[in-house]
Image: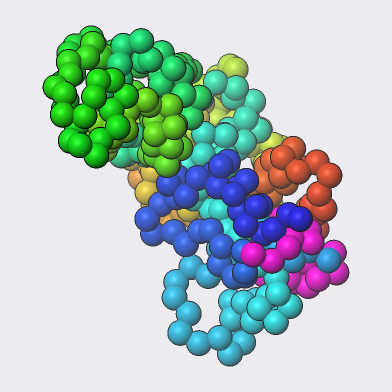
Amino acid sequence: MTTIKNIINILDQWAPPAYAEDFDNVGLLVGNTSRECSGILVSLDCIENVVDEALNERCNLIVCFHPIIFSGLKKITGKDYVERVVLKAIQHDIAIFALHTRLDNHPEGVNKVLIEKLGISSSKVLIPKPSGIKKLNTYVPKEQSAKVLHALHEAGAGALGNYTDCSFTLEGTGQFKGNKASKPHLGKPLEKIQVDETQIQVVFKSHLTPLIEQALLTSHPYENIAYEIYNLDNTLPSIGMGRIGELSQPMDEEIFLSFVKSKLNPKALRHSPLIGKPINRVAVLGGSGSFAISNAKQQRADAFITADLKYHQFYQGEKELLLVDVGHYESEQFTKNLIFDYLIKKLPNFAIVLSSTKTNPVNYF
């Protein structure tokens, strides 16, 4: 039996809760994790028609990008579209799970897909997420240090960008004396022991903490293990908002705008005044990205593709940066396929349906 909790565990491994922004409301919004999952409907948004579609497809879990509940609900009476969705989902035992900024910050998420649609194969994060790294120090008998280090690496410790199995070790002398109730790995109770030990230092992504601790506890020979885990102030360069990279070759500005329209197919495209130079270095940020204009400038972008720019924000290009607003839905339109493809890969024999409901609330005349 596959429960909703099982599906959530798969999604948490892919896009950990630690990737989300503090302001966001992600994870399970409605539903009971212990229920058996009859099928999954994947959608960008969870509106009332999407719940109806889940009913028709016999899916009792909706995995969506945008959270239908963003701020607190004091009543659920069906007076607006949010309450109607929640009410209908509860009435029909349909769970709703939202990913949102977990995928915004994901190294293979919303912005990676968006920039690759523009033919940019080599890019980096525009705004790295701070405080996403922890460090472990521990002490192991020298002859068993390789076993412990291997277990830590297998759990995900020591993975840095394009590198894995990273660590630092120091040799030294450890000392201890157990009481009468102790069961020391070396020596006897009440005997002071000195041991040749290896200090192991590894860094890891913060969301892996439980796995790292479990690996340490199960592989270490001592009855009581001396170790410390602490947060680092380092940013995590592979995780964060937006991406930036270079086109295969520079483009004239108007040709570039036509190119963007052909790749993202927006109904309309808004942009700031032309800057009078070819476009080569391009930054992207799916969804509302005005907060990243200064970051795009600092990274020497020629153009910044995002959505939901206000009138006065178009002035911020200042003949230095071409701001391109392609629309909120259009900048995130590939996200539901990203989620669907991942779930199909992880659960190839499970009922997973890609929603056909049009959820873009913006229309053009």
In the rendered view, does 287 fall on the left or right side of 59?
left
The magenta stretch spans residue 41: yes
Q: Which residues are magenta?
A: 34-57
Q: Nearer the viewer, residue 303 or 10?
A: 10
Quadrant containing the N terminus is: bottom right
Q: Nearer the viewer, residue 344 or 197?
A: 197
Image-quadrant location for residue 197: top left
Q: Residue at x 70, y 82 (%)?
A: 91
- Return the x and y of residue 146 as percentages of the image width and height: 41, 13
Q: Residue at x 47, y 62 (%)?
A: 25
- Return the x and y of residue 51 as percentages of the image width and height: 73, 71
Residue 238 in view in this figure:
no
Quadrant containing the C terminus is: bottom right
Identify the coloring: rainbow
In the rendered view, does 136 fall on the left or right side of 332?
left
Q: Nearer the viewer, residue 241 or 256?
A: 241
- Return the x and y of residue 354 as percentages of the image width and height: 78, 53
